[in-house]
Image (tube, rainbow, N blue to C red):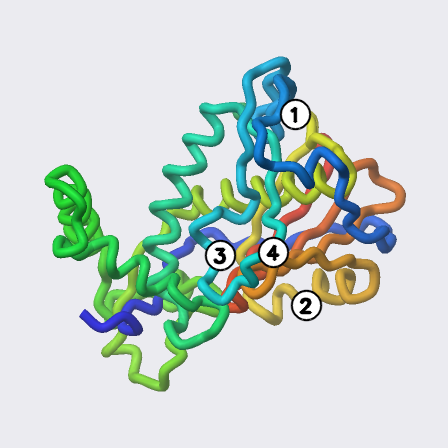
Amino acid sequence: MTQNLLQHLFYLNQTRSDESATLRPLAPLGLKPSQTAMAKRPPRGKCVHCLADNVDRTWDHVFPRSWYPDTTPPNLHKWQIPSCQPCNRDYGRIEEDLLFRLALCVDPHAPATAGIVQKALRSMKPEFAKDERDRAARAARLALLRNELFDGPEIPRSAVYPGLGERWGRPATQGLGVRVPAESLRRLTKKIVRGIFFLEDNAFIEANYLINFYALAEESAEPIKQLLDQFGKEYAREPGIVVRRAVAEDLPMGALFEIDIWGQFKMYASVGPFES
Ligand SMILES: [Zn+2]
């Protein structure tokens, strides 16, 4: 199996954002003392994800730890937020599965994905197994992948995730696609949105707010990009992730997000009150 055969992503529900609130630029991301010392567990308190209060918490990586490429500077401060144990475990499972699929769709030669593709391929190889259980897990991953592959002619063009289509100049018939659960992308987007609000504003996105995820082609994303160019502030942990956020002046917690992963694909999001 060659790694760059698997370039297509499936995503079936593209929506254009209708966000129209006034936007203002933001102050730079300041590091609060509580986020500089990460060795200890956070004290009991509120989970950034599920908002459960007064619970045991652990540090959760906003950009999953295993998603940082090998080219990440060793002293880079990684974003972490306090999460309850069940949310942390749940996200761990989603992120492992998602990384495995996405890694097969990215450019294996880009510096921003150094080690990512190799990690995914290695995770399917029995010769790297530590024990029998690990060997079975690797076999299961390979079997799952074989089940979820699509040949070029079977791939509906509208289902290819923006930015992750054929980039190697081959005819579509020679491509292969792998399915990526939209719900996992939605969950990851929510985590990053909640994470930035917490790190930047020490704010929780309460249950009466809605976080929407959008997969947009370049041209559909143009109105959002223009607003972010004008009013957005950038938060980066390069080369893995670059986030841009613009917050609304006249709508509490209203915001637009662009999330760039490995310089390979983007996820968009809006935040607003439920009733709007
Ligand atoms: Zn939680």
Badge 1 is on which residue? 207
Badge 4 is on which residue? 76
Between disc 4 and disc 2, whose residue precedes? 4
Amino acid at dot 2: Glu
Q: CA distance from mark 4 to mark 1?
A: 32 Å
Q: Residue furthest top?
A: 54
Taking the image as shown, residue 59 lies to the left or right of residue 147, namely right
Residue 128: where, in percent of width, then height?
18, 54
Taking the image as shown, residue 140 lies to the left or right of residue 94, namely left
Q: Quadrant of the C terminus?
A: top right
Residue 52: where, in percent of width, then height?
59, 18
Q: CA distance from mark 4 to mark 3?
A: 10 Å
- Which class describes the residues within 10 Å of circle 3: few (<14), some (14-19), or many (20+)? many
Secondary element under disc 1, as helix, strand or loop, is: loop
Front one among 196 and 135: 135
Badge 3 is on which residue? 68
